[in-house]
Amino acid sequence: MSNGIYFYRMQKSTGFILIAVLFSFQTLCAQSSYVSNLIDSTIDVMKKYAVNKKTVDWKGIADSAKLLAKDAEKPYQMGNSVRYIFKSINDFHGAFFYMDSTFQWQPNQVNVSDSFRNEWKKGVRSITMMLDKNIGYIRVPSMPIANKEEFNIKAQSLNDSLCSLLSKNNVKGLVVDLRLNGGGAMHPMILGLKQLLTDGKLGEFHTDITESWILKGNQFLIDTVAISTIKPFCNIDASKIPVVIITSPITGSSAENLIMAFKGRKNTILLGSRTAGYITINNGFAINDTAFINLAVGYSSDRSGKLYTEAIDPEIPMTAVDKFNDIPNDEKVKAAAAWIRRKF
């Protein structure tokens, strides 16, 4: 009898311990299940669309990402996990957004000089001027877009600046300054400089499909779909004048696509520093009602079909101090003007 009682008590005690352990485990799962599902959903999108989707170990990434987020009760605590995922697929152009939080993996931090910081504080905008009686200068700023209407608004604004410069002066060469251009949308940048380019294919997106960038009249199209439209107030063909594009380590993303659109244009050269290397095509994907990601899904090519998978090197490397408050005496601008004069 005593043995029977002992066995019963052990079973009851063990059952209590087992129930307690299960309760704790279920509580932990309840706390982190949303995070776990969010990681799974994010990886599911990446497995389908990421540019490097065929070259990574997705199961290993998922397991490690969940381990890094084991103590995360809310998505706000997913930073290390999300950065690990982006690092694992070598995507430093993408980002994860949850409510007011943004997580992004940055392999290298660019040391920004005081001249860049001071100019950003003032607010980067388009600037035009004549460097001498025949050489013009235009700064093309970053163009972040909040809605579709802004494509046209920003393209028109840039083109108005270019037309004002070209129509009022005897411009025989142009310096295009992209040093402060960190990206945004490429469409208004390319269309805004339409007088410098010729109609036709200027480049392509390469994802699971191939889509052409087309300049046609006063419109920018992706294949046959018009993305931006402007109404230029000047009718000037400047497609043959010499152009120097000045670059910096900040020049990135859509600014690099703008450079690609000029590749193959005659009498055109890059001067300055290697670009930022944010050359992947990014698309946005909703993960759920409160989270979404920007994801690198492909690369771009220029009009000749050359694919760009890393930062762009200038034909004329130059590392002089940038003088944004004294453009005519900026060493890079002076070197660009000298190159243009030799082309007259």
Image: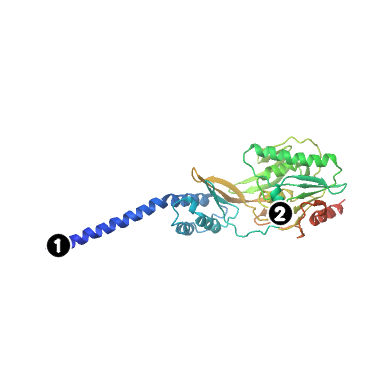
Q: Please determine whether, in this image, residue 182 is positioned above or below residue 158.
A: below
* Element under disc 2: helix
Report whether residue 303 is seen. Answer: no
Q: Residue at x 11, y 63 (%)?
A: 1
Q: Position of residue 9 (x, y in %)?
A: 19, 60
Disc 1 residue type?
Answer: Gly
Left or right of 255, for residue 173 = right
Q: Give neighbour class at mark 2: few <14, some 14-19, many 20+ (Cα, 10 Å).
A: some
Q: Which disc, if any, is residue 166?
A: none
Q: Residue furthest bottom?
A: 3
Q: Residue at x 67, y 52 (%)?
A: 252
Q: Residue furthest left?
A: 1
Q: Give neighbour class at mark 1: few <14, some 14-19, many 20+ (Cα, 10 Å).
A: few
Q: Residue at x 60, y 51 (%)?
A: 298
Q: Please determine whether, in this image, residue 28 is positioned above or below residue 7.
A: above
Q: Position of residue 113 (x, y in %)?
A: 70, 58
Left or right of 297, for residue 32 = left
Asked if the residues shown at circle 1 and circle 2 are in contact, with their CB atoms under 8 angstroms apart, the answer is no
Q: Nearer the viewer, residue 277 or 137?
A: 137
Measure how far apart labels 1 and 2 are at the Cα level: 83 Å
Q: Residue at x 45, y 54 (%)?
A: 72
What colour scheme does the image use? rainbow
Q: Which disc, if any, is residue 116?
A: 2
Q: Which residue is mark 1?
A: 4
* Element under disc 1: helix
Q: Earlier in the sequence, mark 1 or mark 2?
A: 1
Q: Nearer the viewer, residue 192 or 301?
A: 192
Q: Position of residue 8 (x, y in %)?
A: 18, 60
Disc 2 residue type?
Answer: Phe
Report whether residue 79 is seen. Answer: yes
Q: Nearer the viewer, residue 123 or 61?
A: 123
Q: Position of residue 197 (x, y in %)?
A: 76, 44
